Image (cartoon, rainbow, N blue to C red):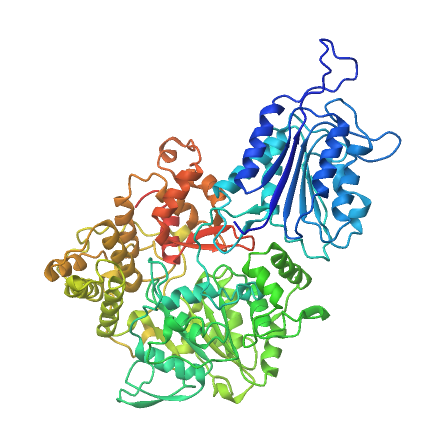
Amino acid sequence: MDGRVRRALCAVIGSFSTGEQEPAPGTLADIPGAGPLRGEMVAALRRLGYDCTVLEGDPPAAELGAAVRGFLAEPMAADGLRIVHVLSHGAKPVNIEGLEVCGGDGAHGAATDVEDWLKQIDRDPEAPATLVLLDVCRAGTATRLPHQLTIGRRRSVVLAASAAADPAFDADFTRAVITALTKVADGRYDVARGFGFVSPDQVARDIEAMVAAPGYGQQVTCSLHSLLDDVPRFRFFPNLTPHDADQLPEGIDPGIGDLAVGLDPAHFIDRAYASGLFPRMATGLFQGRDRLLQQLSAWLDGTTASAPPGPLDGTGVEGAVVEGAAGGRLRVVTGSPGSGKSALLGVLVCAAHPQLRAATDPAWNRLAHVPSRNQELVAVHARQLTTQQVIDSLARQLRLPPPNGTSPDPADTAGAGAEPRGDAADAAARAAGSPAQAARWEGRQATLREGWNMQDLLEGIAAAPTPPVIVIDALDEAAQPAELRQLLLQLADRTGGQESHDEREGGAHDRSGRNGDPRDGGGCRLLVGTRRWRQFTPMLERARAHGGLIDLDEEPAGEVRQAITGYVTALLARQAPYDTAAYANARTAFAVGLATALTTAPSPESSPQRAGRLDSGPTRSPSHAAPGPVGSALNGGVSGSVYGDVRGGLPGVADAGDPGWGPFLVAALYTHHEVTDRALPADPAAARARGARVPLSLPEVMEMDLQARRDDEWARPLLAACAFARGDGMPLDTLMHVAPVFHPDTQPTGLTVADPTFAQAQASLANVRFYLRLTPDHRGVIHYRLFHQGLTDYLRHHPTGP
């Protein structure tokens, strides 16, 4: 609880009889079941920390009016919170428009005039915020009063059971409110830690849906707010049982991602820390890739560096000088899902981005080579973004003038290298999960809804005094990958011209001036992470022709084996009891056995189906075929493929055209499974043998883990539902409705089973938390999605079983 004073008044009037056996004509009907609702409402409010004043019995109108006015007149701090709940009949005043509440005597008048009650609240700008829950006929009248349209600082919010001219039925609104308050107290709105309250609009929409469910046409209404004003930050519903979500490290403005949708700082941060399925740790676990880090860091900095021989320098001479600008304006990092593309880009972005660098220091400070702080670096996680959204995100981060002649907001013109955008109050509001701040950003985006166009972006980059550095990760996961690829090719070409015939055919014709030194102005440096799809051939060929293609699948096996060994050893060294001296040799032996298995091709005579591996299954039918890989021509000059059998697993299941699954993700999944499902042996020989039994694909490891959890009937259906989520994922209430489609009992019969209960869904999600990424929206409501696209692709094809 946040320490605020909370008070509530509960007035439930359900009987309007005078005690006569035959009520007189015109006597108001009693409200069935009203009496017990009084106790239920009070109990629900008290669970939320409200000190309740209760009107017992069915007081007459004069007593009801005096009680409400007296409650509102009690001294209370401005930051306090009040709730007034009234259940009764409502009536129109004699001779004027308005709404009066009926007392138990059936009377109504000036004492129970709702407009006067609300004016008493709103008259004082320092009055505590007050929520009026009005369950009477014609209740909506109280949401459209003249003074509410001109008020300076609103202190009252009315949630009304019905529209202005409509009846309210059988206390359905009060029952819905009690249910909603109970959900708040139980944590069933699934709001993340760091958000101190449940958003009132979410609770109101839930109440609205419950009232509408019986089908009587009863419509809940609420007070209006001007679109030109911030939504008041009323915190009537405290977040008593906050849930864990993926939070940004301390020191990063929570609004950084809101300002330029697409930056997605959590994506780059999580990949840089490389904790895999384990919670984010205090230090980063990224291992290996020293040569690539050195070369890409020099390229990002626009400097030269001395590097060991490798695929990019083309010299084969130890200590050769590598130009940071080599490969011109374009670098492309490609490879199978789980090969470490996003981890490599995550380290580079976190180290170079001015607003991420300091806060993510533990993720990269132990690495020998990282880029410098770069005030001109911008980054986009393109997953499920349209091309227009990518353009808008880049334009905002680059501080381009707003389109359509609109005036820029100061916060929108703060760039990547600027201080956190918005004033201190805005930052505090975002940190507290303020719907007001989110609404403010949404309003700005609506103003700019037509967005920037490609020409705006090219002209802005050309006019920049210093060429920007643009990082785009997950091109293959974008909503319009082919169109976005065309955009990126134009960005890589400082002339901004159209793609040439050679480029369309996959060639790498170098037009005059293109791919020159990126420090000569007029262009940008572009770093892209993507898988090898045929539609990306022009970009991959362009990068390869100028030494800028980095294929992680073709990295020397020895380097990858060493990196995996270090990575798995580091994972185990941070998990009790494997962090003790008794397991020092065993954890290294396990890591060596695992890394050797993942980076050694099987002998020709060995069976393609190792013990524990799944049958590869049929490939996709032609109607479901997707673009295939570019092929070995793009990997020229590099030898020592590390994949072997890993490339061959489960054809047709991986992302379109991908040869298999990268070893780093497989290693992380298998390690997590082994240390959580059963204890590793302390004997080094036994530990190495255990590591060597690693399945050779990500789906096989997940199937192994789910098989161990077969008693949890909702684990796989919920994961399968997450595989079909868009954007940041699905909230829990949506997942609970979708998961039954994938329940095993649904498939044979065709009859969908009942939704899991909240407790069942929450328990199952906790069991498979390590497969999930949890992202709170602007209200703090957690959205669930799978943490890696490889899992998404597999479960979309195998939602109910292998």
Residue furthest out toward the front: 75
Residue at image point 31% right, 75% down = 289
| Residue situated in front as seen by the camera: 377 or 94 | 94
Residue 773, quarter of the rendered image = bottom left
| Residue situated in front as seen by the camera: 174 or 663 | 174
Residue 780 is situated, as x and y percent measured from the top left of the image, at 52, 53
| Residue situated in front as seen by the camera: 74 or 483 | 74
Can you say whether 598 is above or below 146 in the image?
Answer: below
Residue 95 is situated, as x and y percent measured from the top left of the image, at 89, 31
Residue 577, quarter of the rendered image = bottom left
Residue 530 is situated, as x and y percent measured from the top left of the image, at 41, 67
Can you say whether 19 is above or below 159 in the image?
Answer: above
Can you say whether 60 is above or below 447 in the image?
Answer: above
Q: How many marks?
A: 0
Can you say whether 202 is above or below 698 in the image?
Answer: above
Question: Can the viewer see residue 4?
Answer: yes
Residue 302 is situated, as x and y percent measured from the top left of the image, at 45, 86
Question: Can the viewer see residue 593?
Answer: no
Residue at image point 73% right, 43% down = 73
Residue furthest out toward the top: 21
Judge left or right: residue 639 versus residue 692: right
